[in-house]
Amino acid sequence: LPEYMIPSYFMKLENMPLNSNGKLDRKSLPNVEENIITGSVYEAPRNETEEALVKIWEEVLAVKNIGINDNFFELGGHSLNATILIGKIHKEFNVEVPLRELVTSGTIKIISQYIMSKERSVFESIEKVVEKEYYLASSAQRRIYMLQEFDKKSTAYNIPGAIEIEGKLDREKLDRTFLKLIERHETLRTSFKTINGNIIQKVNKIQSVEFKIEEIEVKDEAEIKEKISNFIKFFDLSKAPLLRVGLIKLEEEKHILVFDMHHIISDGTSMGILTREFGEIYGGKEQGELKIQYKDYSEWQNKMQQREGFKKQEEYWLKEFEGEIPVLNMPTDYTRPLVQDFEGDSIDFTIGKKETKGLKEIARETESTMYMVLLSVFKILLSKCSGQEDIIVGTPIAGRQHVDLQNVIGMFVNTLAIRSNINLEDSYEEYLNIIKEKSLNAYENQDYQFEDIVEKLNVRRDVSRNPLFDVMFIMQNMEMNLLELEGLKIKPYNLHNNVSKFDITITAIEGENDIYLNLEYSTKLYRKETINKIIKYFKNIVYSICKNKYIKLKDISILSENEFKVVDDNIKQQIDNSIHDFEFNF
C-alpha cells in the first residue's frame, strides 16, 4: 500500500455495526479518539506517581489507555492544554514542571522521574477576596482599558459572533439563560473607571444591571449583514454589562442570535466556557458554584507581582530588549497612515496533507512544537521580505497557568514579544532550535505583562504603530465547544471581520491532516493581491524546509521553482537574500 493508505492504528471489534438496510452503520462505530496508539509499546504505570500522572493526562487530553511511554504532543497535546497539565501536576504533587521539560521529554515515565527528583514547591490556591466597592484591574484589563481610552469609539477590541438556530426557540428560556450567566459570572456585570489615576473594576449587583435581548428586524436576507454591522458598536466601559445580545427572526422557527462582548471582560478561552455553559443552562443542567471569580484572580495577580520570581522575569525581558529595538519595515502598497487605522480584511489558506506531515516530522525530530515550526517559517518570510535580520513577532498566550482559573470568564491573555536574529549562514534546523529556545524562555517568563515591558523600556510612542512589533502569530489551540441546544439545530453564522489590530496577523489551526491558516491584514497598507503573494511565499518556505530541513536560510527562496525560472539571472541573488527593494511586482 502507498504510505498514505497505511492505517495509523487498529481496533478489534466483535461485530461490525449494521443499519436496518444491512449496510455498515458508521455512526455506531466506536470513537477511535479514545483508543489512540501512538506507535510506542504500551507500558502500564509502575507506581503511584505514574498512576496519578496517567489520570491527569487522560483528563486533560480526553484520551484513554495512556501508557507511560506515550508522548504528550503525539497524543494531541499543545501549549494550552500543556499549561493546564502543568497546573494540575503542581496541585497534585507540589512540584512545578517547566514547559521545556514536557516539550523535550514528553512522556509520563520521564516526567515521573523529574517529579521524584525535585524539591517541593507548595501549591497555593487563589483565595476569595473580601467584598468591597471596587477592585484593582488586572494587568490585561489595564492594557485593554488604555487602548480603548485612546480611541473611545473604536470597535477594535469588540468580540462579536453569531449563530443560526433552526427549531422552536423558547424565548423566555433564552432570556433566563443569559440572565443566569450574568449572575453566575461577575465579569459579565463588571464596569471600569479610573480613581486617583488607578484603573479599577466594579462588580455590579445583578439587580442593577439592565440587560435585554434586542429584537432586530430585517425585511429580507440581504439586509442581515447590514443590521449585524450596525449592531456592533463601541462600548462605554463605565457601564455594565459589556455584553450585548440580539435576535434576528428570519422565519417562525429560524433565527440568528448575535452577540458582542468587549475584550476587557473576555478572551478566546472564555468564549468556549460561555458557549458550553450557555448550552447546559438552556438545557436545564444545574451549574456548580464557581470557586473564585475574576476579581479574586486580579487581586491575587497584583500581589504576585511583588514577589522575587516576578523580578527575575522582569530582568529576563529587559535583557531581551536591551540595545536598539528594531522596527520592521515590510514593503507596503500604501503609505503608512500618520495615526494607526484598524481597517482590515483577511484571507484563509491551507497547508495540505503532504507538507503538514512534513512539518509534523520536523517538530517531532527536533523536539519542537508546531507553533515553533510555523513561527520560524513566518520569521523567515518577514526577513526575506524586509531584508532585516533582527525580527520581533508578537504572540498571545492564554495566561491561565493556575489550575483554579480553568472555568473563569475574563481577560487573561498576555502578549509575548519573541525577538530573534536570523543568520543566513545557519541551516533551517539550527534556526528552528533558536526559535524553540526563545519560545521556551518566553513561556517561562510569561507572567511579566507586555505593557510593563513597554513601560520599563520607555518606548517612544508612535501613534502610527504598535509598541515593539507590528506583526502577530497565533496558534489557535482552543478546543471549540460546539453549541448544543435542546431540540434545536445550531450552526455558526460567519461574520466577516473588517478589523486588523496589526499590519499582519497569521492564525494557524492544526488539523489531523492539514493546517488551516488565516492571514489578517491592514487594508490601509496592503492590497489583496499583495497578501495573496505573501501567502504563496509562506507556502514556498514550508515546501523548502519539508524537502530539506538542513537547507541554509540563504538558500531558501520565497519563489517556487517555476516562478524562479522566469526571473532574470541578474536579480536571482537579490531575491534570494531579500526583496526589500524589489517589492511584489514579479
Image (tube, rainbow, N blue to C red):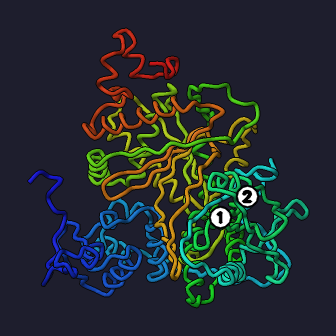
Q: Is mark 1 on a helix, strand or loop?
A: strand
**Front position in the image: 110 or 78:** 78
Where residue 233 appears, x then y in whole percent?
A: 76, 55
Residue 162 lies in quadrant: bottom right
Q: How crowded is mark 2: few (under 14 residues within 10 Å), some or many (20 or more)?
A: some
Q: Seen in the image, is 148 located left or right of residue 563?
A: right
Quadrant location, the N terminus: bottom left
User: Mark 2 touching mark 1, by CB under 8 A?
Assistant: yes
Q: Which residue is drawn at 63% across and 67% down?
A: 257
Task: Specify the amino acid type for callout 2.
Answer: Phe
- Res 231 label: 2
- 406 lies above or below 389: below
**Front position in the image: 24 or 203:** 24
**Front position in the image: 39 or 185:** 185
Which residue is label 1 attached to?
Answer: 258
Where residue 312 appears, x then y in whole percent?
A: 60, 58
- Res 481 label: none
Q: How crowded is mark 1: few (under 14 residues within 10 Å), some or many (20 or more)?
A: many
Q: Seen in the image, is 128 located left or right of residue 352?
A: right
Q: Seen in the image, is 86 located left or right of residue 106?
A: right
Quadrant location, the C terminus: top left
Distance of label 2 from label 1 (alpha carbons): 8 Å
Where residue 73 appears, x then y in whole percent?
A: 34, 63
How many numbered marks does the figure carry? 2
